[in-house]
Image: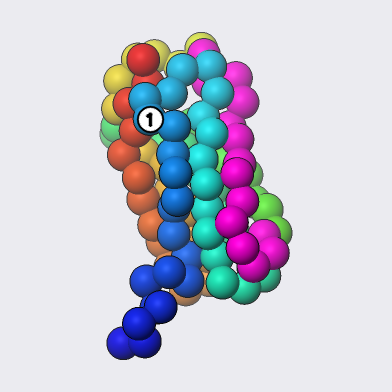
């Protein structure tokens, strides 16, 4: 395994717990399309967006999360090769 292999596609900072907005950072080593999903604790898709990210670190946002019920959620990001997850708490 290349020493930097786990740094090719990952979540950086994530504001957790979140309330009205969900702010999070994704780091990638190359330009790529990324599919982002916010899932409830049962795996049901609540929000989704597909974006093109350049290489580097990016702060992204799911807006209007204030209407979501308090509880556990999962932030999921997928590119062509990997899927990463982060568990979150909505307060």
Quadrant of the image for the C terminus?
Answer: top left
In-image side of 25 versus 30 (left or right): left
Q: Is residue 41 visible?
A: yes
- What residue span does the magenta drawing correspond to? 53-66
As helix, strand or loop, the secondary structure at mark 1 comes to: loop
Residue that appears at 31% across and 87% down: 1
In-image side of 50 versus 6 (left or right): right
Front-most of residues 23 and 49: 23
In-image side of 90 versus 51 (left or right): left
Indicate the position of residue 48 as horizontal and vertical percent values. Answer: 57, 41
The single residue placed furthest to the bottom in the displayed view is 1
Circle 1 sits on which residue?
A: 16
Residue that appears at 55% across and 65% down: 28
Residue 32 vertical placement versus 17 (above, below): below
Indicate the position of residue 76 as horizontal and vertical percent values. Answer: 43, 48
The magenta stretch spans residue 69: no
Indicate the position of residue 67 as horizontal and vertical percent values. Answer: 51, 12
The magenta stretch spans residue 60: yes
Q: Assess disc 1: are there few (<14), some (14-19) or many (≥20) residues with their C-alpha within 10 Å of its C-alpha.
A: some
Residue 30, by quadrant, is bottom right
Residue that appears at 30% across and 20% down: 71
Q: Is residue 43 visible?
A: no
């Amino acid at each position: 395994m290349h020493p930097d292999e786990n740094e090719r596609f990952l979540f950086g900072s994530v504001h957790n717990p979140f309330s009205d907005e969900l702010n999070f950072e994704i780091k990638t080593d190359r330009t790529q399309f990324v599919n982002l999903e916010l899932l409830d604790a049962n795996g049901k898709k609540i929000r989704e967006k597909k974006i093109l990210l350049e290489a580097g670190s990016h702060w992204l946002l799911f807006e209007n999360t204030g209407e979501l019920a308090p509880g556990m959620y999962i932030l999921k990001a997928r590119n062509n090769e990997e899927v990463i997850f982060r568990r979150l708490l909505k307060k």
